Amino acid sequence: MPAAPPSPTPAPTDVELFSAEDGVRSSVDFVFALLAAGDEDGAAENLYPAVAFEQPLALLLTRSGVYTQVDRPKILFVDDVTASEDGKSGTATVTYEMAGAEHTDTVELRRTSANERGADDYAIVTSEDDFGLDASGVELLPADTVYRIHGVDVSAAFLAARSLADGDEVLRIPAFGGTYPLEITVPGPDGFTETVTLQTSTFLGGDGTDGVLRSFAVEHGY
């Protein structure tokens, strides 16, 4: 009796073709692609915990017309990609250009979905404590002050931060990294219009804008 033919070698599934590290890397690339395209609300959907700030405070995470005019971060490369044994988390070192300077940050990611026919999806971990722009000082300026960035009226966001302030504790204005030329108009007979530059230190915000608006207000006697 002839021997039975050997069993065929199982073909690898699509899932086996993608490692957790592939998912981490592709997720970082995806967020930076959204930032490069000026899609701030799409990028915000790929943060962990999910950014769910109330409007109008989060005006700069909507298609307000501001972020497409901002000097945005541009990815150069991603390396040192790691993933936990269970694939639920990972890290990556991303190097990018922003405002003419090269930056390197190590980011942490959390898996948000497992895909049967592709790399898993991960979101970049961030915190409300350092995400966006420092708005402290807005509580010192008059309530009818007008704020514009590249000609777009963003007063609603800054005045929301002002109304929610608890003494000198002021919520940050959610926004991704970049250079924001903030034109400030104080109305009235002694009013004036000046521009202060809010330059973030990372693609998620960081401490680059800390104290800038407060210093502006104090310098003008408020």
Image: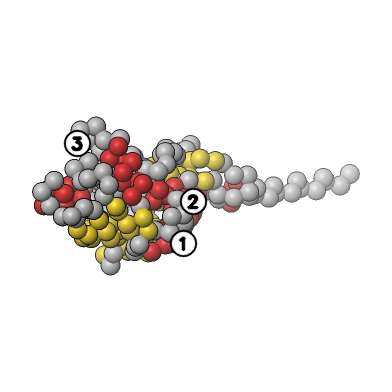
| Circle 3 Cα neighbour tier, 10 Å, few/some/many (<14 / 14–19 / ≥20) | few
Label 3 close to label 2 by CB (< 8 Å): no
| Circle 2 Cα neighbour tier, 10 Å, few/some/many (<14 / 14–19 / ≥20) | some
Q: Which residue is mark 1?
A: 37
Q: CA distance from mark 3 to mark 2?
A: 32 Å
Residue at 30 percent across and 41 percent down: it is 161
Q: Amino acid at mark 2?
A: Gly
Query: With 159 as the anchor, is 212 left or right in this view?
Result: left
Q: Position of residue 131 (x, y in %)?
A: 32, 45
Label 2 close to label 1 by CB (< 8 Å): yes
Q: Nearer the viewer, mark 1 or mark 3?
A: 3
> Which residue is more in the foreground, 19 or 91?
91
Q: Which residue is mark 3?
A: 168
Checking the image for residue 42, the label placed there is 2
Question: Of all residues shown, which one is farthest toward the bottom?
Answer: 100
Q: Earlier in the sequence, mark 1 or mark 3?
A: 1
Quadrant for residue 177, please give it: bottom left
Q: Earlier in the sequence, mark 3 or mark 2?
A: 2
Q: Amino acid at mark 3?
A: Asp
Q: Position of residue 63 (x, y in %)?
A: 46, 54
Q: CA distance from mark 2 to mark 1?
A: 10 Å
